[in-house]
Image (tube, helix red, strand yellow):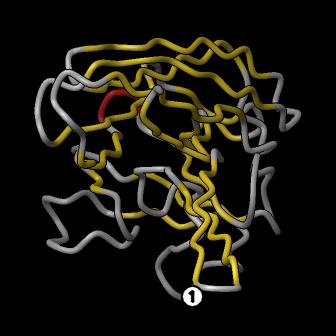
């Protein structure tokens, strides 16, 4: 995550503050519904239409189907303790509205991978910010690998909606009745200098 440094001088003392410039709330999905950090199957989080309050702080589950919250104890998570698995293709999406300055350019970085749960094949995550669309292909072998990608977008309003969904449907190789998909983690947005 990018950090900025601010130094404040008071008479004989200098205080250095480190401030995060990430505009995304709960970027690594470290805050989740309680108590879910010990679920061997992950936890399906209902869409906004079924639940007025998101069980994933800072994020909107704006789809027809649920998304799956997974923990690092039972799945491969790129960073930290938790991540989100997009398990129902285009019908499974997460979003967040961030504050932006109109006509300013921002950088968005996020990680895409697989949960090491038998989900393999060609995956595609689509990310939307302002008027821009980013397609991130990912070839999963079910081994828990991930990659971090970065794109730029130009804000067109004071608030910008970030949306992520999987382009394809996937099932686990050991259980064709279980939907699975790409894992999203560590979403970072900061202004370009």
* Residue at x 58%, y 61% (from the top left corner): 6
Residue 88: image location, x then y, percent: 41, 37
Report the residue marked by disc 1.
35
Q: Which residue is at the front of the view, 105 or 63? A: 105
Which quadrant of the view contains residue 118? Answer: top right
Which quadrant of the view contains residue 156? Answer: top left
* Residue at x 65%, y 63% (from the top left corner): 82
Residue 103: image location, x then y, percent: 19, 21
* Residue at x 44%, y 17% (from the top left corner): 152
Q: Secondary structure at mark 1?
A: loop
* Residue at x 40%, y 50% (from the top left corner): 23
For mark 1, does the 10 Å Cα neighbourhood hold few (<14), some (14 to 19), or many (20 or more) residues?
few
Which quadrant of the view contains residue 56? Answer: bottom left
Q: Is residue 129 left or right of residue 174?
A: left
Q: Is residue 20 left or right of residue 62?
A: right
Q: Which residue is at the front of the view, 14 or 174? A: 14
Q: Is residue 116 left or right of residue 126?
A: right
Q: Which residue is at the front of the view, 153 or 95? A: 153
- Residue most toward the right? 143
Q: Which residue is at the front of the view, 139 or 158? A: 158
Q: Against 178, is 19 above or below?
A: below
Q: Against 89, is 186 above or below?
A: below
- Residue most toward the front? 11
Residue 167: image location, x then y, percent: 42, 19
């Amino acid at each position: 995550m990018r950090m900025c440094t601010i130094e404040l001088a008071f008479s004989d003392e200098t205080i250095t503050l480190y401030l995060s410039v990430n505009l995304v709330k709960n970027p690594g999905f470290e805050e989740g519904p309680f108590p879910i950090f010990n679920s061997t199957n992950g936890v399906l989080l209902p869409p906004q239409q079924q639940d007025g309050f998101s069980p994933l702080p800072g994020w909107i589950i704006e789809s027809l189907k649920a998304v799956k919250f997974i923990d690092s104890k039972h799945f491969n998570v790129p960073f930290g303790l938790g991540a989100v698995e997009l398990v129902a293709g285009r019908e499974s999406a997460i979003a967040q509205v961030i504050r932006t300055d109109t006509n300013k350019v921002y950088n968005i970085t996020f990680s895409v991978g697989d949960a090491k749960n038998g989900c393999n094949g060609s995956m595609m995550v689509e990310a939307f910010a302002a008027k821009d669309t980013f397609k991130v292909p990912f070839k999963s072998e079910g081994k828990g690998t991930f990659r971090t990608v970065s794109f730029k977008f130009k804000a067109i309003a004071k608030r910008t909606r970030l949306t992520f969904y999987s382009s394809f449907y996937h099932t686990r190789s050991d259980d064709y009745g279980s939907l699975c998909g790409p894992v999203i983690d560590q979403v970072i947005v900061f202004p370009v200098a």
